[in-house]
Image: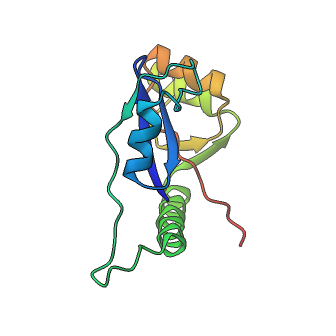
Amino acid sequence: MILFELRCGNDHHFEGWFRDNAAYEAQVAAAAVSCPVCGATDVAKAIMAPRLNRATGEALDLAAAAGAMRKVMGEIRKKVEESCDYVGENFAEEARKIHYGETEARAIYGEASPEQARELKEEGVEFHPVPWPATEN
């Protein structure tokens, strides 16, 4: 089986699994592949990231790669916790105070709802959302 990143004529992106490239070509020619968003059958392959293989031809161990990523994210979290002030659910309020010069500038971290993050972005408040890994095992 092979996974292709696909795109319809309306620029919707989606994935499709096929037995091989010939199966993909046959199904697209028969208009048997349709966009799950709009139903369009004018489908083509989109640019895809290459599959990474080791020198031995063995596929990359995704579990090991995910473990390495969790480790790096954990190190980033530790560094942020050591060097920034935790303001919890008051993040949006504190970020605004710093942005508008109402309080001394300092590095902070905390939580914000998607709505609060959207409002901060619209106001031009600089911040960077980070998807923290869980601290427990």
In the rendered image, which quarter is residue 46 located in? top left
Residue 8 coordinates in the image, percent (x, y): 43, 24
Apparent side of residue 135 relative to residue 95 in the rendered image (left or right): right
Kindly give the residue lying farthest to the left in the view shown.
55
* Residue at point 47%, 60% (across, down): 76
In the image, residue 137 above or below residue 9: below
Tally of marks: 0
* Residue at point 46%, 66% (across, down): 72
Tell which of 23 and 122 is nearer to you: 23
In the rendered image, which quarter is residue 118 located in? top right
* Residue at point 31%, 85% (across, down): 56
In the image, residue 18 above or below residue 101: below
Residue 3 coordinates in the image, percent (x, y): 46, 51
Tell which of 81 and 27 is nearer to you: 27
Tell which of 65 and 18 is nearer to you: 18
Residue 30 coordinates in the image, percent (x, y): 47, 30
Which color scheme is applied?
A: rainbow
* Residue at point 53%, 21% (across, down): 120
In the image, residue 92 above or below residue 40: below
- Which quadrant, please, contains the C terminus? bottom right
